[in-house]
Amino acid sequence: MTQIPSVTGWKAFQKSKMLKTDTIGFFMSLFEENGDFVHFNLLGLNIYLLRDPVLIRYVLQENNGNYTKSIFYKELERMIGKGLLTSEGQEWKKNRRLAQSAFKKSSV
């Protein structure tokens, strides 16, 4: 099994300060320094970032049953309600199918 690059400790704290001032630069620097799959711990939350399309397809389409949303999404659901962003499983599939037509080439 491949080791996932992890940004921790002081380096993680220093990097996290970039989130407020240069959000895109923050994510780009993590990928540039660590590759297409990075683990980042922010305020005790384990965050896994993916940039490789093959990995993203694996997580979101081919093997999505093995991945659940964090407690952050449960809190977010309380604020914005259930929808594509906060739902999982069959409810997510239903919501995704409803939204899919908006992303067809002819619609975009």
Image (cartoon, grey):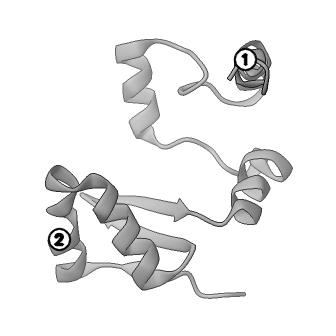
Which structural element holds mark 1? Answer: loop
Q: Is residue 60 left or right of residue 21?
A: right
Q: Residues within 10 Å of mark 1 (few under 14, many from 20)?
A: few
Give the labeled residue for mark 2.
13
Left or right of residue 11: residue 49: right
Labelled disc at residue 77:
none
> Does 69 sit above or below residue 16?
above
Taking the image as shown, residue 85 lies to the left or right of residue 60, namely left
Query: Where is 69 relative to 85, above or below?
Result: below
Q: Quadrant of the N terminus?
A: bottom right
Instruction: Return the residue nearer the eye: 105 or 3.
Output: 105
Mark sitting earlier along the chain (1/2): 2
* Residue at screen point 27% across, 53% down: 23
Residue 28 pos. (x, y %): 39, 67
Query: How many callouts does the rendering have?
Result: 2
Occupied quadrant, residue 104:
top right
Mark 2 lies on a secondary structure that is: helix
Instruction: Kindly indicate whether the residue at mark 2 contacts the one at mark 1 (C-beta within 8 angstroms).
Output: no
Residue 29: percent from the left, percent from the top? Answer: 35, 73
Tell me, for residue 107, which label it has, or none. Answer: 1
